Amino acid sequence: MVDRLSEKQVLAYRRVFDSRKNNNNEVEYRVLAGVLTELGHEQTEEEMEEVFQCLDAYCPSGSVSFPHFLNLMACKFNTGGKVRDLLPPQMDEDLEREMREAFRVFDRDGNGYISQAELKHTLINMGERLTDEEIEDMMKEADVDGDGQVSFPEFCRMMYPPGS
């Protein structure tokens, strides 16, 4: 979806995003409405709540990274899509709860992402003996947005690919 954005749009989004980012190079939810307004996309409180709920699946820390921000902009404001389109495929509540529990096993530091080191450590503790190359390949396959870590939606897509 991000590929539908023009270079000019990405540069404008980057400029505004960078002006509001924190020390972690992310924009906190509390200033996101201002970012959207500055870009000409003023949102109601209800609309912002929907944005936050959807971003929570990717960015549970209360702030959004630039790749996820671009996904939001491409989906909600440039394609006529709905923010809900950012979420993983629908799954029943029991499966989602199980997936979140499994995700937490891998997300050892609780930051909402699985790093390559966390993946390796967890797999070793589970008795899996994989080479560093195999673990790197798993990360590359799961890390759809290329940020070097696996978010909950990416984890879900890896475990239950669309159409499975």
Image (spheres, rainbow, N blue to C red):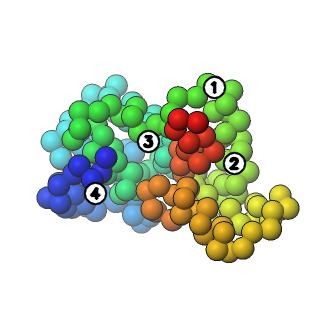
Kindly identify the residue that appears in the image at 58 percent across and 62 percent down: 139
Residue under circle 1?
93
Position of 125 compared to 113: left or right? right
Q: Secondary structure at mark 3?
A: helix
| Earlier-in-chain disc, 1 versus 4 | 4
Question: As drawn, which residue projects farthest toward the bottom?
Answer: 132
Alpha carbon distance from label 2 to label 3: 18 Å
Give, as a three-letter code, the residue at label 4: Phe
Residue under circle 3?
55
| Earlier-in-chain disc, 2 versus 4 | 4
Q: Secondary structure at mark 1?
A: helix
Q: Nearer the viewer, mark 1 or mark 3?
A: 1
Alpha carbon distance from label 2 to label 4: 29 Å
Q: Nearer the viewer, mark 2 or mark 1?
A: 1
Residue 75, image x, y percentages? 30, 40
Alpha carbon distance from label 2 to label 1: 16 Å
Q: Quadrant of the C terminus?
A: top right
Q: Nearer the viewer, residue 37 or 81?
A: 81
Could one spot residue 115 in this view of the protein? no
Residue 113, image x, y percentages? 58, 55
Specify few, some or many for label 4: CA neighbours under 10 Å numbering under 14, 14-19, or 20 or more: many
Residue 109, image x, y percentages? 67, 59
Q: Nearer the viewer, residue 76 or 21?
A: 76
Alpha carbon distance from label 1 to label 4: 34 Å
Q: Is the Cβ of the residue at disc 2 closer than 8 Å to that at disc 4? A: no
Give, as a three-letter code, the residue at label 1: Glu
Q: Is the Cβ of the residue at disc 2 closer than 8 Å to that at disc 3? A: no
Specify few, some or many for label 3: CA neighbours under 10 Å numbering under 14, 14-19, or 20 or more: many
Residue 89, compared with residue 126, is above or below; it is above
